[in-house]
Amino acid sequence: MPAVRRPLVAGNWKMNGSRAALAEIGGMAQAFDAGLRSKIDLLVCPPVPLLWAAAKAALGTGIAVGAQDCHARTSGAHTGDVSAEMLADVGATAVIVGHSERRADHGEKDQDVRAKAEAVRRAALTAIVCVGETRDEREAGKTLAVVRRQLRGSIPEGSTAAGLVVAYEPVWAIGTGLTPTVADVAEVHGMIRAELRKLVGKGEFEGVRILYGGSVKPSNAAELMAVENVDGALVGGASLKASDFMGIAGVYR
Ligand code: PGA
């Protein structure tokens, strides 16, 4: 395994948090000391209304901020939508695209996810492309086929290691307290790396970080983060409190 992959621990606040929650970024900054900063990247993705204030709160702390979705276009008549360029303008450095909750709530398909990931790249931000199987798909033995199809459909051609992160998030593990076995995580992440070799190309695929997401907590993070080809975590519920989030990030100390 090349030493080029710097772990990334990313928090997805989803539709949670008011301005008062910005104090958690202060708590995270306190625990993100020079030792840990030298080892990992830390990213917090709050809801859009908090993004600008979160970027200001994170200034000088080493913590990056990102968004949870964007529109595929730069600007125009798209009421209620937000472009990647707008997110960059208020301080985002990354955008999560294709989260299973967006695929389910908004009917986003692989081709939509790819268009959004392309928009993220156009804005010179990092796209965190989410993939993962449902419980039915896992029970039917289709996990690898489903994730492979999502990767092929969602990842833009010509993606670079700096511009792309893949997050494997089994839908049945999100917010449920359930997690796959380490053997299952290793199998899927190994397949993703092999697929990236074809999709992203030589010289880049080894540097793309593959995050595991779905019920990551301080109590299971060490075990999950130790799996080969797991280069960090995408954390939902446990990213809302600085103590939990930094308990997870702290496994990299
Ligand atoms: P969870 O969510 O950590 O609350 O399971 C993860 C995610 O949806 O990104």
Image (cartoon, grey):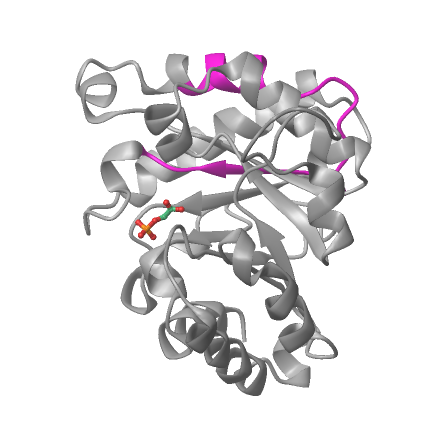
Q: Is residue 45 visible?
A: no
Front in this rendered view, residue 33 or 51: 51
Image quarter where the N terminus lies is top right
Q: Check the image and report above or below for 64 versus 105.
A: below
Residue at the location (25% across, 48% down)?
Answer: 175
Q: Check the image and report above or below for 20 versus 65.
A: below
Percent from the top left, x then y, of residue 188?
42, 30
Percent from the top left, x then y, of residue 99?
44, 34
Front in this rendered view, residue 92 or 187: 92
Residue 64 is inside the magenta segment? no
Answer left or right for 39 relative to 175: right
Answer left or right for 166 relative to 222: right
Percent from the top left, x then y, of residue 71?
62, 29
Image quarter where the C terminus lies is bottom right
Residue at the location (59% across, 80% down)?
Answer: 32
Q: Which residues are magenta?
A: 147-170
Q: Is residue 7 visible?
A: yes
Q: Quadrant of residue 180?
A: top left
Q: Check the image and report above or below for 142 versus 246.
A: above
Answer left or right for 45 relative to 71: left
